[in-house]
Image: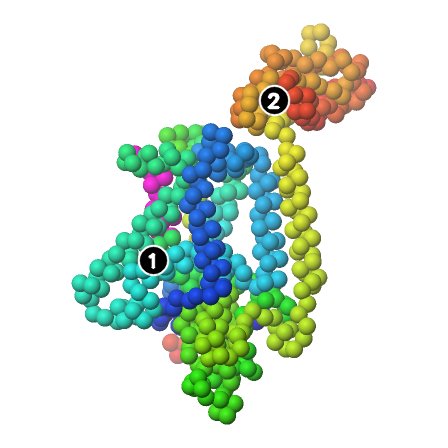
Amino acid sequence: MTNTDTTSTPITQRVIAVLWPSFLTAGVATILFFTAFDPQIILAVSGYSEISRLGGYTIGFFLFWMLTSSSCALTCYFQRPCLDPSAVASPRE
Amino acid sequence: MQPHTTPHDEAGSFYAKHKKVYPREVHGIFATFRTLGVLILLGSYYFVPWLSWEGHQAVLFDLPARKFYIFGLIFWPQDFFYLAALLIIAAFALFFFTALAGRLWCGYACPQTVWTEAFLWIERKVEGDRNKQIKLDNAPLSRVKFSRKFLKHFLWISFSLWTGFTFVGFFTPILDLAKEIYTLNLGSWETFWVLFYGFATYGNAGWMREQVCIYMCPYARFQSAMFDKDTLVISYDKTRGDPRGSRKKSADPRAMALGDCVDCTLCVQVCPTGIDIRDGLQYQCIGCAACIDVCNEVMAKMDYPRSLIKYTTQHAIDGFQTNLLRPRVIIYAILLTIISGSLIYSISTRLPLKLDILRDRNTLYRVTPEGKIENSYTLKMINMDKIPHHYTLSVAGVTGINIIMRSTDILINAGDSLVLPVQLAVDPANLPGLSQKISFTLTATDNPKLSLTQTGAFVGPRTH
């Protein structure tokens, strides 16, 4: 592949670009979500009543982080240029 | 301000071939301000959770109980509005101070700066100043090097764990937490967060340091949008300093065709982000003013005037008057005053009582055997006061309306909530339309001022 912006970006920077913004937004999402909904009630309804509220917050935060980081990772992935069909065809020539 | 970047310095250098920055210790007026900031901010961070107020922890964001205590005030999830207002105030304050004085936040108050400063202090105590640190890092592994490094990391990790413990202490009562740790009974979630926050502190302040500012901080990226030509920035006076060159103190720089900069590179050595301020304004500059302090020291030694590197504005550099009161500064200030003013007003006149009215959604209305029209409601009440109260409920809006409930006396303990089913019955002759606006009023029997009115709807049959 050619030396484009994304490929020349160091791997650490890409990892941080995925993990860090998603961490921030997951934090905000956790605050907003759990202000509106009590984790204990959600847990009780879904049959996990043995998990404490703090556990609920923690699980919620990491679920949010997983979600936001996957979308960050997808964005990062889609930033790579698409393979040009002619470039794919060229080796046969 | 346009971020100063060159094509090659942006991507590769800091991650792939990152060079460790060894900031040299600096003394001076701005260093004193920063130390003061560190002491006040970290001091209050570690101290505040141990304060108590009227029998509870003074500042406690009690997540398990879903209540926030801030000294005499108790906030509930229903008070989310205040948190939102507080965040808006914080954002506008950041805009305001950035427009006025540049990266004041970064240089003196940001947790990243403050904790890094504390970690640097530990590092200096163990490994010595900059030159000794570089020497130690370049030396082969020896018993001395190992013990120094071990001690440094041991202190860093202990400090980080204490930081993590304090962090969790803001969310669960810190005394209970301390007891649980002492008896080795700490809950798994609490243990996790102590370690998580501790690890983040150790990583960010011990290892990542300036890279957090350069690569991870969103503010560092967008702050240039808040800058204008009248914003305070740290700048090297090129016309006075260049051409640079070393010289004896007795030498006449003019005769040697030199500027005032003696090219001692101390400004580069003290920089926590490892830049050369003499290259002009750079986005990596966090505005800590360490270079100002150290350069002033050198200028004093050379008997040259101070302020070769100084806080200034682009307009001043270009020879214009600096304009303090610009439209954006005034707008930020007005917005800041209005929002903070209304928040303070709203909190100080806050009624420690909540009332929510839910109409029964399943049936619109019911006709009783006596021929009256009946509606059902669920009332949710919270007593946010610090003492229990008896309340009475009254309804207005329709003549001859009757309240049917278990007991007319409603008792709610301090900080408790109550869900109360209530029926209202009305003679159909008194119902003018399909839906009638009614109001519920909840009043404390011991304090008539503690009274709250909420409106709802009463639904009846079509009258024609």
Residue located at (59% from left, 58% from top): B97
Which quadrant of the structure image shows residue A55? top left
Badge 2: how crowded within 10 Å, few (<14), some, or many (20+)? some
Residue interval drawn in magenta: B185-200
What is the x, y in percent for residue B152? 28, 57
Any magenta on residue A74?
Answer: no
Helix, strand or loop under label 1: helix
Which quadrant of the structure image shows residue B209? bottom left
Relative to B40, say whether B254 is above or below.
below
In the image, B424 versus B329, the foreground residue is B329
Q: Is residue B343 visible?
A: yes
Residue located at (67% from left, 49% from top): B337
Helix, strand or loop under label 2: strand
Which of disc 2 and disc 1 is earlier in sequence?
Answer: 1
Residue located at (38% from left, 76% from top): A91
Q: CA distance from mark 1 to mark 2?
A: 59 Å
Chain that bears disc 2: B
Relative to B445, say whether A62 is above or below.
below
- Quarter of the figure with the C terminus of chain B: top right
Q: Which mark is residue B122?
A: 1
Residue flagged by tag 2: what amino acid is it?
Answer: Thr
Residue flagged by tag 1: what amino acid is it?
Answer: Ile
Left or right of B59, for residue B329: right
Q: Return the residue at label 2.
A: B378
